[in-house]
Amino acid sequence: MATEHRRGDRVAAAIREVVATFLAEEAKDPRITSFVTVTGVEVTRDLRHAKVFVSVMGSDAERAKTFEGLASVASFLRARVGQSLRLRLAPEISFKPDESVAHAAHIENLLSKIKEGTLPPDGDSDA
């Protein structure tokens, strides 16, 4: 049982590397216009599905277009992952937004406002 879990972690890490390399060097879809960072990958126990978490910088419209572009390259990436990792059955890839970078920036902004004393008394001015 423990070896299956470790295999899933290894496959997830390898998928992350393949997808990140593809997005950085080979992605040609014009909808993928903003800065995209692969932050993590979760695979199911049977390795049939992979959720690729990405952080996308840009406006809401750019983010929406980027996710449309990512959805369109998912089947190509599935074949690429299967070929690169020599898997008998490559996992279906779906892209999910990772908001942790945006949340961290928001927290950093609030902390700096608290330090400067410019945060309103009601707390979060951006919420």
Image (cartoon, rainbow, N blue to C red):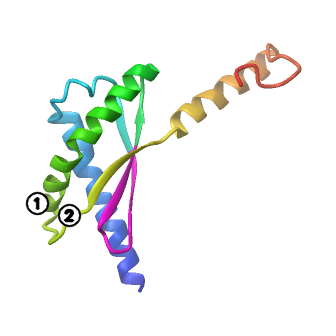
User: Residue 3 magenta-drawn?
Assistant: no
- Residue at image point 27% right, 43% down: 20
Query: What mark, if any, has residue 90 been given in the picture?
Result: 2
The residue lying toward the viewer, choosing from 94 and 43, is 94
Whichever of callouts 2 and 1 sits on the residue coming sooner in the sequence is: 1
Tell me if label 2 and label 1 are in contact, CB under 8 Å. yes
Picture coordinates of residue 125, whole percent (x, y): 75, 19
Picture coordinates of residue 5, whole percent (x, y): 40, 76
Picture coordinates of residue 76, whole percent (x, y): 15, 47
Picture coordinates of residue 54, whole percent (x, y): 39, 41
Dominant secondary-structure state across the stretch colored magenta: strand
User: Residue 49 magenta-drawn?
Assistant: yes
Looking at the image, which residue sits at the far right? 121
The residue lying toward the viewer, choosing from 6 and 52, is 52
Quadrant position of residue 73: top left
Looking at the image, which residue sits at the far bottom? 1
- Residue at image point 24% right, 46% down: 74
Q: Residues within 10 Å of mark 1 (few under 14, many from 20)?
A: few
- Residue at image point 23% right, 35% down: 24
Q: Residues within 10 Å of mark 2 (few under 14, many from 20)?
A: many
The residue lying toward the viewer, choosing from 115 and 7, is 7
The Cα atoms of the two marked residues, 2 and 1, are separated by: 8 Å
Three-letter code for the amino acid on which mark 1 is drawn: Gln
Q: Is the C terminus in the top left, top right, bottom left or bottom right quadrant?
A: top right
* Residue 126, above or below 89: above
71 sits left or right of 42 in the view: left
- Magenta range: 39-53
Residue holding disc 1: 83
* Residue 20, above or below 111: below
